[in-house]
Amino acid sequence: MEFSVNRGIGKPAEFQGLKSQYLFIFAGGLLGLFIVFVVMFMAGVNQWICIGFGVISALILVYGTFSLNRKYGEHGLMKAQARRNHPRYVISRRNFSRLFNYELRIKNYEPV
């Protein structure tokens, strides 16, 4: 008996070109959109307004998700978010003269 080797091990999940995190964005967006649609319909909003809102929102979601996937790639969106959270520069509030007298601080150091 011969078994074929699974060559998909270690590769990211992919569906119609969407990779990894974009699948979660897409699925979560569609789920949220469905919940909003149901709430609007149950609240008594006209069904054609609900359908129009659902279709237009779904088209915007699909276009936005695929454009993010195309622009940033598999890991680029996480890198962009990390870059946004990383400080541009570190602020040191010490006096300028205190930066240069390191030896004096060590010499005068008394352990507790």
Image (tube, rainbow, N blue to C red):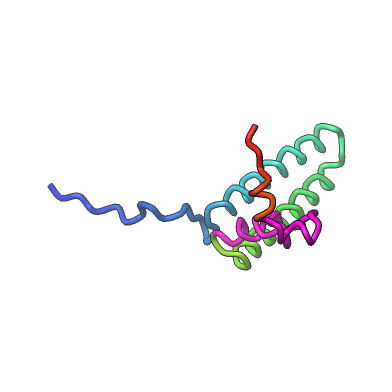
Residue occupying image coordinates x 56% and y 64%: 73
Magenta stretch: residue 52 in it?
A: no
* Furthest residue toward front: 107
From where the camera sits, is residue 14 visible? yes
From where the camera sits, is residue 59 visible? no
Q: Residue 72 is drawn in which quadrant? A: bottom right
Residue nearest the viewer, comparing 80 with 1: 80
Residue nearest the viewer, comparing 22 with 61: 22
Percent of width and height locating residue 4 = 23, 53
- What is the number of callouts on the image? 0
* Furthest residue toward bottom: 71
Rendered view: 50 above or below 94: above
Residue nearest the viewer, comparing 12 with 78: 78
Rendered view: 59 above or below 37: below
Q: Residue 88 is drawn in which quadrant? A: bottom right
Magenta stretch: residue 92 in it?
A: yes
Residue nearest the viewer, comparing 37 with 5: 5
Percent of width and height locating residue 38 = 75, 36
In the displayed structure image, the side of residue 30 where residue 37 appears, left or right: right
In the displayed structure image, the side of residue 13 where residue 27 appears, left or right: right
What span is colored magenta in the figure?
75-102
Rendered view: 50 above or below 103: above
Image quarter of the C terminus: top right
Q: Residue 62 is drawn in which quadrant? A: bottom right
Percent of width and height locating residue 3 = 20, 49
In the displayed structure image, the side of residue 12 where residue 65 appears, left or right: right
* Furthest residue toward left: 1
Percent of width and height locating residue 50 = 81, 44
Residue occupying image coordinates x 71% and y 41%: 32
